[in-house]
Image: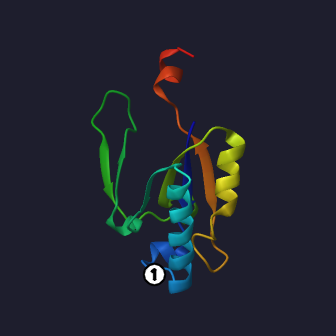
């Protein structure tokens, strides 16, 4: 089962403030544990939304609208993600609970979401 641990953005991540060395070390150790356990598929941090582009489709059938960042609603933004392949929802929660506060400063928030896989989308099980 694939799950994505979505690291939510904060004022610090949107301000392009890099984490302190202790947090970088803790996150490195956490990622090494994921790799050693054979569950990490991918992990990346994202640049602030000031470097982002948002494409929206406000009217069906019409051309999409392109908007350059930054985007103001920090709580709706993503700062990074880790994709894991685990045996159960419970295991995914266990791994998410082990992640250090990804933002530090008491601002960290992780959203855990299961990824649709091909058999689910085609109706096969």
29 with respect to 87 (left or right): left
Residue located farthest toward the front when viewing the structure as drawn: 36
Q: Quadrant of the C terminus?
A: top right
Disc 1: which residue: 17
The residue at 52%/57% (across/down) is 36
- Asked if residue 106 is positioned above or below residue 79 in the image, the reply reads below
The residue at 63%/64% (across/down) is 99
- Asked if residue 124 is positioned above or below residue 110 in the image, the reply reads above
Q: In front here: 36 or 7?
A: 36
- Residue 38, position in %: x, y? 52, 50
Q: In front here: 76 or 79?
A: 79
Would residue 119 be visible to someone looking at this image? Answer: yes
Would residue 73 be visible to someone looking at this image? Answer: no
Q: In front here: 5 or 72?
A: 5
The residue at 49%/29% (across/down) is 117
The residue at 30%/32% (across/down) is 62
């Amino acid at each position: 089962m694939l799950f994505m641990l979505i690291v939510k953005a904060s004022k610090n991540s949107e301000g392009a403030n890099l984490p302190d060395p202790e947090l970088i070390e803790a996150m490195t150790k956490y990622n090494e544990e994921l790799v050693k356990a054979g569950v990490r598929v991918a992990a990346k941090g994202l640049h602030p939304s000031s470097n982002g582009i948002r494409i929206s489709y406000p009217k069906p059938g019409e051309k999409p609208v392109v908007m350059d960042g930054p985007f103001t609603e920090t709580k709706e933004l993503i700062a990074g993600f880790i994709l894991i392949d685990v045996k159960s929802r419970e295991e995914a929660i266990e791994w998410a609970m082990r992640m250090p506060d990804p933002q530090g400063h008491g601002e960290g928030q992780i959203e855990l979401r299961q990824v649709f896989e091909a058999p689910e989308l085609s109706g096969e099980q």
